Amino acid sequence: MNSFLSFLVENIQTFFTYTGFVNVTPGHIAMIVVGLIFIYLAIAHEFEPMLLIPIGFGILIGNIPFKDAGLQIGIYEEGSVLNILYQGVTKGWYPPLIFLGIGAMTDFSALISNPKLMLVGAAAQFGIFGAYVLSLFWGFEPNQAGAIGIIGGADGPTAIFLSSKLAPNLMGAIAISAYSYMALVPVIQPPLMRLFTTKKERVMRMKPPRAVSQTEKIVFPIVGLLLTCFLVPSGLPLLGMLFFGNLLKESGVTRRLAETARGPLIDTITILLGVTVGASTQATQFLTFNSLKIFGLGALSFIIATSAGILFVKFFNLFLKEGNKINPLIGNSGVSAVPDSARISQTVGLEYDPTNYLLMHAMGPNVAGVIGSAVAAGILLGFLS
Amino acid sequence: MRNLKVISGICLFFIFFAGAQAQRTSFLRINEVLVINQDNYVDDYGKKHPWIEIYNSSPATVDIGACFLTNDLRNPKKYMVPKGDVLTKISPRQHVLFWADNNPTYGTFHLNFTLDQDSTKTNFIALFDSDGRTLIDSVTIPAGQKADISYGLVEDGWTQQKLEETLRLNSLYKKGDKLWVYYEKVTPSANNVILDSNEKIENFKLNDADGLGMTLTAMSVVFVALILLYLIFKYIGKVAMDLSRKRVMKVSGVTKEQASELASESGALYAAIAMAIYETTEAHDAENMVLTIKNVARNYSPWSSKIYSLRTLPKKN
């Protein structure tokens, strides 16, 4: 009887060593709190809920403490379910699939009708390289700096894709940082927009975009792909899928494929990407001084990108005729957080003139920003891989 | 219609053919050879023999099975690499090693010929594709080979063209202008040049420590890409508006100026018209979020034909 009791006690003790309560560390608690904040922001304030809910819950999943007993449960344990799903992130095939969906849901008409807005999308990429310079200054290696800099592209899939190639060990921090600041675009951008513009500029009216023919919409993804990928072949996975998705949408004969790409496919991949990126932030891997630095650099990159976009519009206006000038409030939307930054142009614009609708104009630089950040990612990959 | 099908068929054939080509053995290279193996790498039997290293220079796995290795150009099918051995599949940028020991029964990687160790004679080695006619790669090892010093490509898998291109583009390349060089430290089944650092990154650290060079270059490329797109679509937009104006002039019989005004009309106007029609008549197709006005045509189909419908019950006999 005694031996049976001692066996039971021993078993319970062993079981107890496997529980999260024994293995928990302050790091796990900190990360769980971060996950809960993400979920709170998504539900209470509707900050990018499609991203923050999966990522926030993924952080909870990834930070359940457990004893490393080879049970194949952790995301970093080869063969575990989470590890298999995480392959889409580490091998870089989730981001291009997301881009396929983005292409299939993006209407480039605003950009086609006023193509000079592409330059605003280009200018906002200064955020990437500003952060690159600062990262080098803070002691990161050039490849790590490139991966951190891409946060300024405000494009989660691109950030994940590039960091998985250039600095896989920093990917969790970079992805979380990119998605966090994308969610915080409504907080970061408006003060900068007010700071860099005058009251007169904010009420500037732009010419309404002209109607774009179907032929132009079909030609756009084909020419866009050939041109950008001939120039930067390393951007092919992202740009190829983006333009392919857009052709599915615009061709008018592949409606079912376009519906799938912008519906079930992108939803599935978003869920898997979000939850696995979140789960990859295990406290032991994630809570480092470097992660803090990456968060700081991420914030700076968004600030630089927004400022560069607005200031570029002001500079560009010096060369444009009256009537063709651009409202600098759409400069922020070169930051390719689609469509949030365009929506902010609209909201801030309406504050100063309730009849001045900037949304369609802002969508031009917004989608140009997607192309620009993918091109920039291709350049960084080509130079630093 | 028939012509279209033929053209599509030809296009598809070329696509599949090109795809198949991309995976083929043409990426294999004779990478390093040791003719006199005196005190060097030993095989699975503990024997020292000359060896030939083959490198897969492609980014995909290539199966060397069914290819031929020979030391005699008149007999290209001298040794066929056995098919069906998983070990003959060479991973991307990886190697396999063949022993020129004239002992093919020892296994897949033991050849049925050996190399001439007479220092006054040259050795010829060739790799042929599975048809026994297509030469993939060959090398003539010069006379005067020394013991335990291998003869290999200056960089893994390089060709003369690649070397010349590098010499032309990279003035910092310091390994000379010879494609084949001697290695005192032999590297069987390993890279001829061991990479212990990322050359590109080291270059950036050395020459662009503050990142300004990268910023200028990359931003220039981003701007060039988007400026080119801008110029192309500015032109395409003009052409589209011209066409639209001509169409308007033809249909409405208005003047050029009036047509220009109509052609450059904002899309918002059409959206408003479409929305109004939708709200009042619900005339639209099935696509979500897109309002399209189409003629309703009832095309004939056997599925909707009354002729084929079962309108009366079969008669009972």
Image: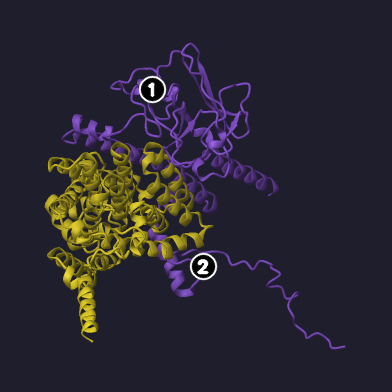
Chain colours: A yellow, B purple
Amino acid type, callout 1: Asp
Q: Secondary structure at mark 1?
A: loop
Frontmost residue, A181 versus B209: B209
Residue at (27, 56) in percent of width and height: A337
B108 with respect to B208 (left or right)? right
Residue under numbered circle 2: B285
A137 with respect to B7 (left or right)? left
Query: Dot 1, crowdedness within 10 Å: few (<14), some or many (≥20)?
Result: some
Q: Secondary structure at mark 2?
A: loop
Position of B72 relative to B11 (above/below): above
**Picture quarter containing residue A14?**
bottom left
Frontmost residue, B20 versus B223: B20
Q: Position of residue A313 (x, y in %)?
A: 22, 45
* N-term mark: 2 or 1: 1
**Picture quarter containing residue B170?**
top left
Amino acid type, callout 2: Asp
Frontmost residue, A331 versus A317: A331
Residue under numbered circle 1: B148
**Picture quarter containing residue B12?**
top right
Q: Which quadrant would the C terminus of chain B be assigned to in this image?
A: bottom right
B51 with respect to A179 (left or right)? right
Tell me which chain the residue with mark 2 is part of: B
CA gap, disc 2 to disc 1?
77 Å
Position of A175 relative to B140 (above/below): below
Query: Dot 2, crowdedness within 10 Å: few (<14), some or many (≥20)?
Result: few
Position of B90 relative to B282 (above/below): above
